[in-house]
Image: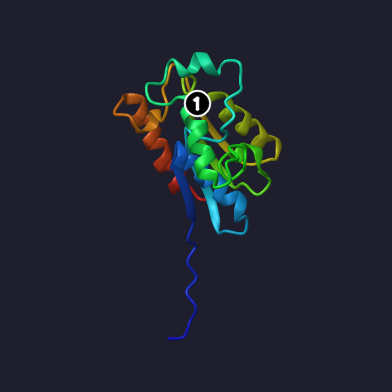
Amino acid sequence: SGQACSHNLELVLAGDSAGGGLAAATLQRNPKQLVSKLVLISPWLDSEFDHPGMLELSKNGPWLLPDNLTCIARVWSGTGDHLDPRVSPLRGDLKNFRKTQLFIGNWDIFYFDVREFAQRLLGLGVELDYQELSNALHVFPLLPTPEGAKARSQIVDFIGSRA
């Protein structure tokens, strides 16, 4: 009939671990995207791994080792620079971030970086739903546990809520 459609579609970027870091880096590099929300599950946000408590946390996680991740980040960057914001988005500009839901366990190797990221987002006035779980491993929302089921339910609610 020639009438324009007016749909209120929302684009949600979501990712876990490296995918969470990639979602954050994507928004940084393309701030004019029509992204309304981010869901980041244990995102890999920095590849320096220099926090004093990092070594202790690396003993808790059965599958992530800081030295291996730094090596992967160097290759992933394409330049050998593991601190490039494209692979370490914590080091990039966060001013264009949208409403964000962020999950992290305090036994996760990315715990300290995620907490810093959350503090920076809050400092910029970003609407943040920060979910930190005690004694939880990397990507706990994806694990077949009661805590994981609860987190998945929260993600569904967050995505379904109006921006």
Residue 114 versus residue 77: which sits nearer the camera? 77
User: Disc 1 residue type?
Assistant: Asp
Residue at the left extreme, as displayed? 144
Indicate the position of residue 117 as horizontal and vertical percent values: 61, 33
Question: Is residue 115 depicted above or below 60 in this figure?
Answer: below
Query: Can residue 157 be seen in the rendering of this structure?
Result: yes
Q: How is the image coloured?
A: rainbow
Residue at the right extreme, as displayed? 123
| Snapshot quadrant of residue 154 | top left
Residue 116 versus residue 160: which sits nearer the camera? 116
User: Judging from the image, what secondary structure is the residue with disc 1 in?
Assistant: helix
Query: Which residue does the image show at 46% across and 39% down from the upper left?
Result: 18
Indicate the position of residue 148 as horizontal and vertical percent values: 35, 29
Query: Can residue 134 be seen in the rendering of this structure?
Result: no
Horizontally, residue 157 falls left or right of residue 70, namely left
Residue that badge 1 annotates: 67
Query: Which residue does the image show at 52% across and 16% down from the upper left?
Result: 55
